[in-house]
């Protein structure tokens, strides 16, 4: 690309799903409903796993971190998209875009790490129950979470430095509802994006390692579950593991497809819809899967509601 076409970007334009005002309003309302549901569900898990003494186990410690992460993760992209839809604007400043990319890649990478840790926790609990308390002690859990958050921050920083230090070219139109790396790469000269490609290759290799680790963990988990003589025991174990596996698969597969497939100048509706499955769906589904289907969470909610009623009656 000619040097005269390379300029310093001041702002980008998020095309989103459509230029139509009616479609944008519909998109804004749908995203608003989903966003409120995701915030409410994740906040509920945060409160219950923090206050209830019966939920102070490694599994709920990891779930508390996942809920806080999802609370932040969906807040990085969706609110801006909702505001743009209702105000019929598409612009996002260079600084806002860089900030969005940093936090998005930070939280997405941390979520991948936390989901991997959670699969190892289920492996330790089901395959090595007698050693579980020693293996998953509090210090080990804190270290794993610290490394997960640190890996996310490093990933976000590397992506921002390698992408936004390069000159952008073209019309600065992003066919997306948020600033995502593949869309931004299409605005860069193919001769200078080698640094970001290296970062993406490194990140992809880490995701692959996480995916293999999760797969191996679940191979051992399911083989152990099938040897449980009690049908009730097998059912309980499956109900604990399968929801987690569904979330992991949805998140990693949809994200991998979006980052590997070529970017089209005229994206189809499926191209625009795909990012929803790794940005919006997981943070919304996690509370449903882990709270509404969990007897422990339901009992914790009843206990906290009972405490609330008791305190209210004491002041009546």
Image (cartoon, rainbow, N blue to C red):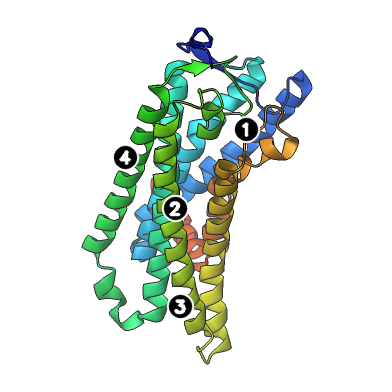
> Image point 38% across, 60% down: which residue?
117
> Image point 44% across, 26% down: which residue?
192
Mark 4 and mark 1 residues within 8 Å of each other at the beta carbon:
no
> Image point 41% across, 21% down: which residue?
166
Mark 4–mark 2 distance (CA, rounded to whole Å): 14 Å
Mark 2 and mark 3 residues within 8 Å of each other at the beta carbon:
no
Mark 4–mark 1 distance (CA, rounded to whole Å): 31 Å
**Where is residue 156 drawn, in percent x and y?**
38, 36
Q: Nearer the viewer, residue 313 or 230?
A: 230
Q: Compare marks 1 and 3 and give the one earlier in the sequence.
A: 1
Q: Quadrant of residue 216?
A: bottom left
Question: Closer to the observer: label 4 or label 1?
Answer: 4
Question: Closer to the observer: label 2 or label 3?
Answer: 2
* 302 lies above or below 151: below
Mark 2–mark 3 distance (CA, rounded to whole Å): 20 Å
Q: Compare marks 2 and 3 and give the one earlier in the sequence.
A: 2
* 38 lies above or below 169: below
- Secondary structure at numbered mark 2: helix
Q: Nearer the viewer, residue 93 or 129?
A: 93
Mark 4 highlights which residue?
A: 154
Q: Is residue 57 visible?
A: no
Q: Quadrant of residue 12?
A: top right
Mark 1 highlights which residue?
A: 32
């Amino acid at each position: 690309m000619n040097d005269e076409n390379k300029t310093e970007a001041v702002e980008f334009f998020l095309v989103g799903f459509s230029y139509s005002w009616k479609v944008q309003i519909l998109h804004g309302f749908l995203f608003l409903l989903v966003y409120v549901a995701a915030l409410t569900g994740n906040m509920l898990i945060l409160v219950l796993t923090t206050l209830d003494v019966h939920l102070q186990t490694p599994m709920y410690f990891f779930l508390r971190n996942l809920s806080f992460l999802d609370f932040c993760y969906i807040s990085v992209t969706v609110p801006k998209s909702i505001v743009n839809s209702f105000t019929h604007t598409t612009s996002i400043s260079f600084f806002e875009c860089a900030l969005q990319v940093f936090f998005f890649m930070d939280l997405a990478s941390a979520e991948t790490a936390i989901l991997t840790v959670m699969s190892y926790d289920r492996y330790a609990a089901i395959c090595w129950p007698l050693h579980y308390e020693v293996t998953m002690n509090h210090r080990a859990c804190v270290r794993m979470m610290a490394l997960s958050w640190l890996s996310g921050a490093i990933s976000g920083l590397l992506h921002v430095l390698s992408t936004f230090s390069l000159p952008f070219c073209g019309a600065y139109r992003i066919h997306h509802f948020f600033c995502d790396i593949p869309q931004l790469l299409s605005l860069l000269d193919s001769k200078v994006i080698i640094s970001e490609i290296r970062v993406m290759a490194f990140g992809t290799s880490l995701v692959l390692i996480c995916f293999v680790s999760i797969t191996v963990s679940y191979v051992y988990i399911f083989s152990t579950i099938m040897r449980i003589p009690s049908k009730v025991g097998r059912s309980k174990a499956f109900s604990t593991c399968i929801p987690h596996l569904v979330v992991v698969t949805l998140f990693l597969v949809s994200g991998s497809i979006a980052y590997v497939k070529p970017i089209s100048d005229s994206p189809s509706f499926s191209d625009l819809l795909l990012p929803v499955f790794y940005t919006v769906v997981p943070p919304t589904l996690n509370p449903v899967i882990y709270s509404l289907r969990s007897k422990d969470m339901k009992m914790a909610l009843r206990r906290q509601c009972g405490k609330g009623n008791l305190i209210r009656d004491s002041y009546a």
